[in-house]
Amino acid sequence: MHTPSRRRFLATLGAAVIAAHSPGPLAAAPSGRRRIPRDGRTVPAIGLGTWQAFDYADDAAADRDALATLKLLADAAGVVDSSPMYGRSEAVLGRLLRDADPERAVFVATKVWTRGKSEGRAQIDESMRLIGRDPIDLLQIHNLSDYDTQLATVLELKAAGRVRYAGATHYTAGAHAELVRAIEGGKLDFVQVNYSLREREAARTVFPAARANGVAVLVNRPFAEGDVFRATKGKPLPDFAREIGAASWAQYALKFILGEAAVTCAIPGTRNPKHCADNLGAATGPMPDAALCRRMAEHFDTL
């Protein structure tokens, strides 16, 4: 159960970060949640990635930040994504989730990233042990590695009740055609793909296939490895950002992504609780329609 002091901390942190740039009444918050097409379950439209941010050891300051970030995510019952590829991230995530999320409200996603059936099964079992979740919400084939073999294992575990949703991932436009073929195979509940103001190809490739096949979409690289912030550093937000309540460039970039109806959840990576609170704020207020998304992209291209 969330204690009053914890709730005050979360409310104060989130409000302080978001209100510092608040555009006023335009920031009125809707639910900020989106449906998983397969069964109608809802998740927040902004989650958390752990690549690099949770790959550390023996760092008390990093632990404090990561724990505070996960508490924010748990309070929102949000999505956190990891992988065996991410070094110590699964182990750090599992250790901190015991304190941050005792009610197991967080939707936990990880991946299998190896070759061979026995190797895949062993890696999956180890991921569940490290994270401390069995069943796990979402198990994805990382970068489509040994796709057919690993998908068979994921589906077996799903049928056995140890996995709730099956997914596949990639992070480059060159793999979008493969992701589309995987989606059209009819076995996936989720697909994870790169999409941002800098990398827009998925809107023409992966998203139409996901919509047509009832597949949820997680968006990785929402800031294009920081390229979005390098382009916008020192530049003011355009006046029209107020129309969607974007209070920072991070919110502008995330709201652009959420303007695409196929997107279920974007997963920016961070362990900084202030950045996490700001990111979560992108799920509140109005979202851009197609015309405003074009205007947002065109403006970004001028920076």
Image (cartoon, rainbow, N blue to C red):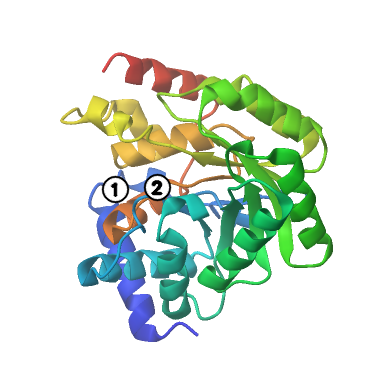
Q: Mark 2 points at which residue?
A: 27
The answer to whether 92 appears left or right of 60 in the picture is right
Q: Is residue 230 left or right of residue 103?
A: left
Q: Name the residue under label 1.
A: 22
Q: Which residue is drawn at 47% across and 18% down?
A: 294
Q: Residue 210 at what x, y percent from top left? A: 71, 33
Sequence-wise first label, 1 or 2: 1
The relative height of residue 62 versus residue 289 in the rendered view (above or below) is below
Q: Is mark 2 on a helix, strand or loop?
A: helix
Q: Looking at this view, is 25 or 83 the one in front?
A: 83
Marks 1 and 2, Cα distance to the nearest angstrom? 7 Å
Residue 140 appears at what percent x and percent y? 64, 49
Quadrant where the image shows the C terminus: top left
Q: Residue 200 vs residue 109: left or right?
A: left
Please give the label number shown on residue 137.
Answer: none
Above or below — where is 259 with respect to 303? Answer: below
Rate crowding at label 1 as few (under 14), some (14 to 19) or many (20 or more) other CA atoms within 10 Å.
some
Examine the rendering and report whether any part of residue 189 can be seen: no
In what element is the residue under mark 1?
A: loop
Residue at image position (41%, 55%) is: 87
Residue located farthest toward the left when viewing the structure as drawn: 234
Picture coordinates of residue 171 (x, y %)? 51, 33
The image quadrant of residue 157 is bottom right
Neighbours of disc 2 within 10 Å: few (<14), some (14-19), many (20+): many
Looking at the image, do the residues carrying marks 1 and 2 touch, with CB atoms under 8 Å apart? yes
Dot 1 amino acid type: Ser
- Horizontal side, residue 150 vs residue 226: left or right: right
- Counting from the top left corner in percent of width and height, residue 279 is at 38, 49
